[in-house]
Amino acid sequence: MAHVGNGAAGEEEDCFEDAYDRMPSACRMDLQTAIQETQCALNLVLNNKFSQALDLLRPWWKDSMYHALGYSSILVMQATMTFEHKDIQTAMTAIKEALQTCQRFRKRNSMVGSLSSLINKQSNLQEEEMHAELCYAECLLQKATLTFIQDENMISFIKGGIKIRTSYQIYKDCQNVLNMTPDRAGQSSSFKQFEGGVKLGIGSFNLMLSLLPQRILRLLEFIGFSGNRSFGLAHLREGASSQSLRSILCVLTLLFYNTYVSLILGTGEGNLLEAETLLEPFQQKYPKGSIILFYSARISTLRGNFEKVCFYLNIYNFTLSQ
């Protein structure tokens, strides 16, 4: 569990100082425990227990990067589902707090969107700082998403684009860190969690960008973006097969691509067999999870098995009524 000091009341107050470097080390949440608790919160979300997930993350969400990322991610998920102004504002506030929390864990001399100096001296980049870059990049993406849906004007579009550009650059730098680490088998579990996060980010960006019209993609390449569909799918598949916190997110990204995006854009590359294979273990683990039921019904619809569609929808409606 988290390492919490046994000192006097004054020491306990130090746990909630804004400046992370002023906190006693005994009051910090260690990285491995933070990842484990965030995984527990994700499991609760997949079992439709959103409130319990938030309750689990809330005590540490201003002092732990993973608790901050998990807490804000749940609120962003709810905001994108309801599109209610109140939910969007709550999520935006949480994202700003999460970015500040992640920033306190980042390398002191790192510039936003650039880790080149750290990559050249990788030994100076600690695992906690590597994870801070990942969490910061993910929070930036979430903030960009909310910026787009909060106010659909040109200024919001530019602001969101800048955040996406910064996030993309961080992921590319994290990929370079992985490329400079040949001995993956002997790495710690937290490093493998870092690798899973990079697979998700690099894979999602490459897949997303590859779906854009070539004319737009050529313009984006001038400012450093590039998209390779096969490269992106390969990274997502590797991330989905890993035992990392973000493996389920890689799975959901692949499911969305195979059951919606490929059909809407007419790429002809949707793979229902892959979607079914990816979904099967989660159907057993979260049989009443709304997200899992949604994709189960979607695949059955595409297969033309409407009896199964009705079955999944009945479970879904029953679960929501509880």
Image: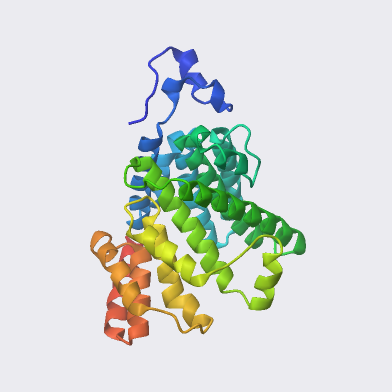
Extreme residue in the top direction: 8
Residue 52 in view of the camera: no
Q: Quadrant of residue 159?
A: bottom right
What residue do we see at 41% from left, 13% from top? 7
Does 97 sit above or below residue 86? above
Q: In which quadrant will I find the N terminus?
A: top left
Does 155 sit above or below residue 189? below
What residue do we see at 71% from left, 70% from top? 219
Extreme residue in the left direction: 284
Does 20 sit above or below residue 100? above
Q: Quadrant of residue 168?
A: bottom right
Residue 277 in view of the camera: yes
- Which of 123 and 294 lies nearest the eye of the viewer? 123
Q: Position of residue 77 (x, y in %)?
A: 49, 57
Q: Position of residue 102 (x, y in %)?
A: 54, 39
Q: In which quadrant will I find the C terminus?
A: bottom left
